[in-house]
Image: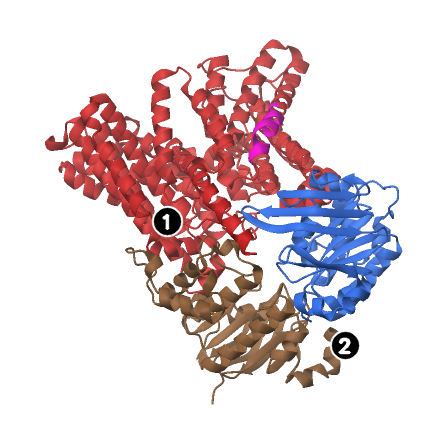
Amino acid sequence: MKLSVSQLDSFYGPAHILSDVALDVGAGEVVALLGRNGAGKSTTLRSIMGLVPQRTGRIVFEGRDISTLQTHEIARLGLGYVPEDRRIFTELTVEENLMVGRQPPRKGAPAWTRDKVFSLFPNLGEMRGRLGGRMSGGEQQMLTIGRTLMGNPSLLLLDEPSEGLAPKIVEEMAEVVLAMKREGLSVLLSEQNLHFARKISDRASIIEKGRIRFSGTMAELEANPGIRDAYLAV
Amino acid sequence: MTALLEVEGLTKSYGGVHAVRDVSFALETGKILALIGPNGAGKSTCFNMLNGQIRPDRGVIRIAGRNTTGLSPRAIWRLGVGRTFQITATFNSMTVRENMQVALLSHHRELFVPRGFAGRFHVGRADALLDLVGMGHQAERACGELAYGDLKRLELAVALANEPKLLLMDEPTAGMAPKERADLMNLTARIARERGLGVLFTEHDMDVVFAHADRIMVLNRGELIAQGVPQQVRNDARVKATYLGGAT
Amino acid sequence: MEFLAVQFLTGLASAASLFLVASGLSIIFGVTRIVNFAHGAFYMLGAYLAYTLTERLSGPLGFWGGLLTAALAIAAIGVIVEIMLLRRIYRAPELFQLLATFGLTLMVQDLVVMIWGPEDLVGPRAPGLKGAIEIFGQLVPRYDLFLIVLGPTVLGLLWLLFRRTRWGVLVRAATQDRDMVAALGVNQKWLFTSVFALGVFLAGLGGALQIPRDAVSHAMDLRIIVEAFVVVVIGGLGSVFGAFIAAVIVSELNAFGILILPKISLVLVFLVMAAILVFRPWGLFGRAEGQPRQTLGLTIRPWKPFTRTERIAAALAALVAALLPLVDGAYALTVAAEILVFTLFAASLGFLMTVGGLSSFGHAAYFGLGAYGAAFVAKSAGLPMEVALLVGPLLGLAGAVVFGWFCVRLSGVYFAMLTLAFAQITWSVAFQWVEGTGGDNGILGVWPSAWAANPERFYWLVLAITATGIAALRALAFSPFGYAMRAARDSDLRAEAIGIDRKRVQWTAFIVAGTFAGIAGALFAFLKGSVFPENLAIPLSIDGLVMVLLGGVETVSGAVAGAIVYKALAIWLVSQAEFSKLVLGGVIVTLVVAFPKGIVGFIEDMRARRPRAKAAAVAEAAE
C-alpha cells in the first residue's frame, strides 16, 4: 500500500471530529473519500497532512509511520496536499506561486518542472506574470494543483477539486486527474460530487459523522444503492 | 401591480472592467428566483449590490416600490430584507439562541438597553423560529461548534427575525449533502409560500436550481445571457455553451 | 531657504535609522503576526553593544566592523528569543505575544543599566566621515550624508531580497498563509526564525548606526518603539516601501515641527498619523486585511452570568476586602486603595477588549483625563472632592467621545495604534501646556474632603466605587447592549446584516470604558493628592493591557484578577528588589508561557475539564 491509515482519531479542541478512520490507497490508484460537508472528509486529509493539532492513530506512507511528523516533513516525503479552498497566494504571480511549491526531485515519483505544469495547464502558461488574486476560480484551482505538483509528490491529497466550479470546468478537472494518474501519481480525493468521483476513481470510501461507513470498489458502491442513498442521497 | 423587487440597468465596473453590466429583472412575491453563472461571472457583485454592500455605478433597485439604490445594508434590512451568506457569518462566541436574540433585539430596537439580562429577552420568539428551521434542540449550543449544515439553517432563522418580505440567499446549500439541500430548499419554499416572501438565491448546484427555482437567470461575464423558467434555460443554446456544458 | 534645505537633509539622515527599525518591525509583523514590542529594546542593545565594540576596537575596520558585529550579535540574540520564547506562543491570542515581548523589554531595561550603568554614553565618531561639508553655505555632517544614502540602499537591498530570491518569495507567501506554505514542504519554523533574525538585525543596525550622532541611553528603547509603530502604521503594516516613505515623513515632521510649530512639535507626528488613518485606514501602502484572524482563541464556552453561588462568593470577597482596615495599617490601606483604583481601570479596559474586542493601546488617556478633570475642579475651581469626583470623569468621557469617534472607524492593530496616537497627543498637551497643567511639575495638593481624609475612610470610599463600577460593567456585558458589542466583535458582516450599527455600538462602548477609566483616574488624583503627565503616559496604557491579558481575554472579569496580581506584584517588587523591572519582566514572560489563556482563563479551563469529560461520556453512550 502507498498510504495506509488506521485507527485515526482527530479533535478540534473539545470536539471529537474523526473516530477510528481507516483508509488505504494503493500505488497508482485513485481513491475517493465521499461524504457530505462536515462529515469529516477535509479533516481526514488535513489529519494525514498533520494540519490538525490533535490526532492519534497510525498513518503509514510508503512503509513509514508519519503520524507524529510535522506538516512540512510529511510534504517532503512526497505527500502533496491541495486544499479545498485553493489557498492561492494572491499577492504572488503564477510563477512565484509555483516557486513556493518547488522541491527537489524524488525517486519513484513523477518529476515536474514549471514547463511540464504549463503543458498540463496551458491556461497558466499564458498568464505567468499574473497575480494569483486576479485569476478566476477555475484558473486558481489549476494553479493550486500545479503548485503542489512542483513538489514532485508521489501521492496527491485532493480536497474537493470540483467545489464551486462551473460544470464545464468540472469536466476538465476530471481529465486533469486522469492525466496525473497516467503519470503514475496516486490520488486520494475528497468529494461530494458522486458524478465527478465516479468518472475518475478506482475505489471509494464513505465517511459520515467522522466514521468510515463503507469501503469498496466503485462498482461495489454502484451495486449498493442502499448505502449510496443513506449517506450520499443522490 | 409593482413587483417585490425590481432591478433596472444595474451596472458596476472595477478599473474599467465591467463586473456587472446592464442587468434588469423583477421578482414577484411568493416566487423563488435563482441567479446562476460561472465563478467570476458577477453573481456576487450583483448580489451585494442588492443587499447594499456594494454601491452600483448605474441602475435602480426598488424593493416593494421603494428605491433602495445605494442604501446601507442596515437600512435595507430595516426595510424588510433578510439575507444569508455564502460563507456563514454568525456570532461564534454566542449560543444559537443568543444569535437569534441579538437579531430580535435589533429588530425591536432594543440593542442600546443597558439593563437586564439579554438572555431573557424574546426567548419564545427565538425558539419558535429555531423550531421552524429544525434547530430548536440545539438552542443552547455555542455557534462555533455547530456542523456546517446547522449553521446554514441558523442563518435562515436569523434572516427571518425581522419578518422580511424578501430573502436574499447567497449559495444557501453550498457544502451540504444532497438530502440536506433538498430539505433546506423545501423549507425555504414553504416559508416563502406561507409568509408571502420573495426569494432570490445564487447557487452552483444545478439539481437544486432546477428543482426549486420558479425562474432562473444566467449571468456570464457580467451580463444576463438568459432568463426564464427552468425548462427554457436548460435548453438555451448559449447557456449550454458557456456554462452547463454537456453534463446536464 | 538654504537653512531649510539643510534642515531637510538632517531630517533625511534621521529617517535612515528609523526606517531600519520600522522596516524590521513591519517584516516581522507581516510574517509572524507578532507586534514585537521588544523591537526598541533590540535597537537599544544594538547601540550599547556597538558602543562597547567600537571603544575596544580601533581604526576604520574596528569601527565599521564593530557596528556590523553588534547588529549580528543582536540578530543572534533574536534567534535565541524566537526559539526559546516566541515559538511557544505563536498560536496564542495575538496580543499575548505583545505581552511577552513587553516583558522582554522590561528585562532589557534593567539589564542595560546593570551592565552599562545609568549614565548616557557618547560613542566615537565615524572614521573617514568626521567633520562636515558645506552645502548651500551651511555645514552638513558627512555622517549624515552617509545615512541619507544608506536608507535607499537598504530599501533597494530589501526589495531585491523579497523579489528576486526564493527565500523572499517564501516569506511573502508565508505572510499570507503560513499553513499552506508548510503543506508545500517549507519548514516554517526556520522561516520564522530567519525573518525574526532579519528584523531584529535591522533594529540592531539602526541602533548601532546612531552612536556617532546621539548619546546612548537607557531610555532610547521606548522613544524609538513608539516612533517605529507610528511609521509602520502610516506606511501600512507589512510594507517595506511604506515604512521608508513614512520614516521620511515622520523625520521631516520632527525636523521642521520644532522650527515652525515648537508648541505642538511633540504631537505633530501623531496628529498627522491620526489624519492619515482617518482617510486611509490601512496606512499609505497597506492593504485592507482580509478576514482578520479570530481575535480571541477558542470561544467554545459561552459566557454565563454569575450563578447564585458565584454572586454570593463575589459579595463575600467584597466584604472581606471591606474588613481590611481592621487588620492593616495606613500604608497597607493606601497600597490596597491603589490596587483597587487600578482594578477599576483594568476592568474598564477589559470591558472594551473582551466584550467589545477592541484592544486600546492608549486607555491611560481617559484615566489621566479623569485625574486632571478632578484636579481642575478641586484646585482651579476650588470645589469639594464630592463635586470633583462627579465632574472630573466627565473630562475622560469627553475625550472618549472625541477620540472614540475616529478610532472605531479602524480595527485590529490600526485601531490600537490610533488609540496610542491619541493618548500620546493627550500626554503632550498635559506636558507642554504648562499654564494649565503645570507641565512636568503636575498639579499638587488635590486632597479629599475632611470626612474622607483618613486612610480607612478613603479606602472604603474607593472600595465602594470600584466594586460598584466593576459590577456595573459586568451587568452591562450581559445586557442587550453587551450582546450588541459581542455581535459587532464576532462578525461585522452579520452585525450589519441584521441592522446593528457597528460603529455606533463600538463608539458607545468606547465612551463607557473611557468614563469608567476617568472615574478611576479621579479617585487616583485624590489618593495621591497630585496629578502628573505620567498618569496618562504610554507605560500606564501598557500596564492596563498587561493586567487584562494576564487575567485572560476570553473571560468577562479576568481583568480584575489580572490587575490585583500585577499591581500587587509590581508594588511589592519595587519595594523589595533593586532591579524590579528585570524580575517583573521575567515573571510576565513566565506567566505568558505557562498560562496562555490568562489566570482566569486557566482556572475556567480547569473547572470546565471535569464536566466536559462527563458530557463526552454521555454523548458516547448515546451513540
Residue type for callout 2 = Ala
Q: Observer-nearest residue: B56 or C413?
A: C413
Display colour for chain A: blue
Spot occupied by residue B225 in the image (x, y as percentages of width and height)? 68, 79
Mark 2 → mark 1, Cα distance in angstroms: 55 Å
Q: How is the image coloured?
A: by chain
Picture layout, residue A94 above or below residue C553: below
SS for tag 1?
helix
Task: Identify residue type, mark 1.
Answer: Gly
Which residue is under mark 2? B241
Q: In terms of secondary structure, where does tag 2 sit?
A: helix
- State which mark lies toward you, 2 or 1: 2
- On the image, the x and y values in percent for residue C474 come to 32, 47
Instruction: From the image, give the main secondary structure of the stretch colored magenta.
Output: helix
- Observer able to see residue C563: yes
Q: Which residues are magenta?
A: C77-89
Query: What letter labels the chain drawn in red?
Result: C
Q: Position of residue A60 (x, y in %)?
A: 77, 43
Image quarter where the C terminus of chain A lies is bottom right
